[in-house]
Image: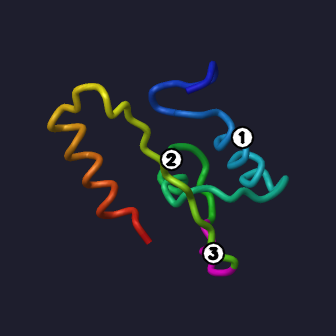
Amino acid sequence: MNDRDTPDRPSGRPMAAALAAILSLGVAVLPKVALTLPGPAVRGVRLVAPRLTRIVALARNTTRYESPAARTFAEFLRARLRP
């Protein structure tokens, strides 16, 4: 989180990009969840080419205790995020 973050708005930057698009000042490439955010309606357009990808990483200290919940979460990520 940065200094502009709030619990209901994790980052001010995507909101600024969405606002610029809403005001017809430009376009923004945002995750689909942006369509559900409160505020003025935005129009979603599905991008099919080029395909956008996101790298997700999980860092952990293998010399420290790993709780069952953390282990289950890591297994969940590995099972669902592999291409």
Q: Residue at x 63, y 75 (%)?
A: 51
Q: Which residues are magenta?
A: 44-49
Residue 45 in percent (x, y) is at: 63, 72
**Label 3 sits on residue:** 51
Q: Secondary structure at mark 2?
A: loop
Say if 46 sits above or below 65 in the image. Answer: below
Tag 2 or tag 1, which sits nearer the N-term?
Answer: 1
Q: Is residue 10 left or right of residue 47?
A: left
Instruction: Tell me if residue 15 is in the magenta stretch.
Output: no
Q: Residues within 10 Å of mark 1 (few under 14, many from 20)?
A: few
Dividing the picture into quadrants, the one containing residue 31 is: bottom right
Return the residue nearer the eye: 74 or 54. 74
**Label 2 sits on residue:** 37
Tag 1 or tag 3, which sits nearer the N-term?
Answer: 1
Return the residue nearer the eye: 43 or 45. 45
Amino acid of disc 1: Ala
Amino acid of disc 2: Leu
Return the residue nearer the eye: 41 or 33. 33
Q: Residue at x 69, y 77 (%)?
A: 50
